[in-house]
Every structure is written in structure tokens, then in C-alpha cells.
Image (cartoon, rainbow, N blue to C red):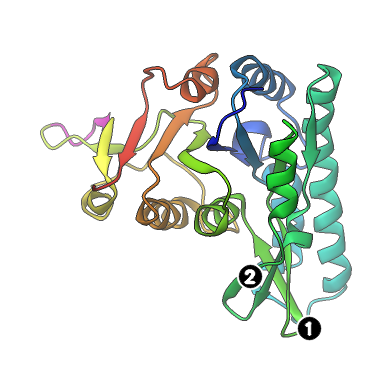
Amino acid sequence: MKANKNLSLLKLGGGLLTDKNQPYSLRKDIIRSSVRQIIEADEKIILIHGGGSFGHPLAKKYKVSGGLDKSIPNQVLGVAETHHSMIKFNNHIINNFLESNYPVLSIQPSSVFIRDSQVTYTNSLDVIKTALDLNIIPILYGDIILDRQGSFSIISGDQIILELCNNFTGYHISKVIFAMESDGLYIVDEIESENCKLVTECYADELDTLNLADLGQKIDVTGGIKSKLDIIKSVCKTKIPVQLINGLIEGNIYKSLKNQNINCTNILINE
């Protein structure tokens, strides 16, 4: 792995790696392809992945994101089950790297982050930096998060990215990459409203003015597309550009990590 102080944050969406309509399902070909491209790119990154069909069904069943509710049977047990399910999902991804003899390290977000009501705190990010210094890819994922007020909720992969953008030091985060199931953001065509076109480039402060097309994306328990756009705007406020790419297209992850041109949405920052 290259020794430099530039770093990319790569988020592999849970809906990309799993079939959200089928609990505990893996898109093994997509996982293998994504891992292979990351290894071939050989760039300094922190990898984050979503919950997909492992995290969302249990989080929804036990209403984990809403916090402690004693009227929900076995909710605290459900919190533990949700966390354990994400560990199992994460292990599949870890194993793909290790089978290719590539060093990665699973970092449990529930041990790194904690909340106090609405505020998220980082206990320490030193372990992530030290892993990077050792040329190990740290891998984080959507997880449960405990609350000092005696409760809990969910910290999504997108929220983890924002926390890293705000608090990670020692490396320069050059960009954030979201690998999804579409080429990026689409807007309704002003002339032919039944059609839509890809937004290839825009500034973060233009996101609220876009007439986004409905591509049938389902809202998940961590907020869906509106939540993602809010995160993206906050990331860009830290002066880090964002790229939305189609992870289903072979080579896109590699090209993005190598800063090669691809058909995607680039969200720029105002200088």
C-alpha cells in the first residue's frame, strides 16, 4: 500500500452488497468484485459499509433507532442481536480480503462512538490511524450506538463518515466515495418530465435546489436519500468533495480510487 498522507473514505452501501428484500442475503459476486478493485487500486483508504439485509430487519423489528422503549418485548436483546448480525456481515467482507492475503482490521463502531442525547462523541480514533500507519485497511460499518443517558440507537455508515470527516486527524481526507446501485443523483428533465438525467457535477449548496427524480429508492431505517444528502452537505462543509458512483459497474470503484473519469455524480466544494 502506498505510503502517503492522502486518504479516501469509501462507503459500500448495504443495498449494494446485500439484497435488502431478503434478510441475511449476500451479493457475493459484488462483494468479491469490490474487494478485488480495492486491492488492485492499493490506495490508502478507510472502508465503511452499510447494514443492508443484516442490520435493517432487526433494527426495524426492535425499533432500535428510536431508543429504549420498555413496551417493546426483548428490545435490549434485539440491540445485541442487531450488533451481532452486523459482525457476521462484516466478517464476510473481512474474509474476502484475508483470503487474498490483504491486511484489513475490523473496527467496531459501537466501541469507538458513543452518544449523549443527540450529540455523538468519539472515544478515540487512534486505533484507526495506527492501522493506516501499518498499511492495514480499517473497516467500519453501520452499528448500534450506546447512549450515556441509558439508551441506544443506530449509527449508520453515512454518519460514521461524517464523524470521521469532522474528527479524524493525521491524514488528509481527499474525498468521500459512496458506492451505490445507481450512477448518482438524477433530476427530472425540464423539457420531458417523464425522463430524468444524471447530475454529473454540482456544488453542495445546490443540492437543495435539485428536482430529484424518484428512482424507486426505498427509505430505510437510517433515513434514506434525504439523510444521505444532509450528510453530504455536512461533509462538504469540511471542505471534502464527494463522489457518488455505481458500485454495480465493474471497475468503477477502482477508477474512483485512482481518480479516473467515470460516469457519476461529483459534488464539489466552494473554495
Depth check, mark 1 against mark 2: the one in front is 2
Residue 120's mark?
none
* Viewer-side residue, 23 vs 119: 119
> Few, some or many C-alpha atoms within 10 Å of disc 2 (few <14, some 14-19, many ≥20)?
some
Name which residue lies at 77% across and 48% down: 107
Question: In this figure, which residue is indicated by the disc labeled 2?
Answer: 121
Q: Which residues are magenta?
A: 192-199
In the picture, measured across the screen, residue 12 lies left or right of residue 137, that is left
Q: The residue under label 2 is which amino acid type? A: Tyr
Q: Is residue 249 above or below residue 240?
A: above
Q: The residue under label 1 is which amino acid type? A: Ser
> Few, some or many C-alpha atoms within 10 Å of disc 1 (few <14, some 14-19, many ≥20)?
few
Can residue 72 be seen here? yes
Question: In this figure, which residue is indicated by the disc labeled 1?
Answer: 71
Q: Is residue 73 above or below residue 137?
A: below
Q: Position of residue 38 (x, y in %)?
A: 63, 22
Name which residue lies at 69% across and 61% down: 60
Q: Position of residue 50 (x, y in %)?
A: 64, 45
Name which residue lies at 36% across and 50% down: 239
Q: Position of residue 120 (x, y in %)?
A: 61, 70
In the picture, measured across the screen, residue 101 lies left or right of residue 63, that is right
Q: Is residue 150 above or below residue 64?
A: below
Q: Quadrant of the N terminus?
A: top right
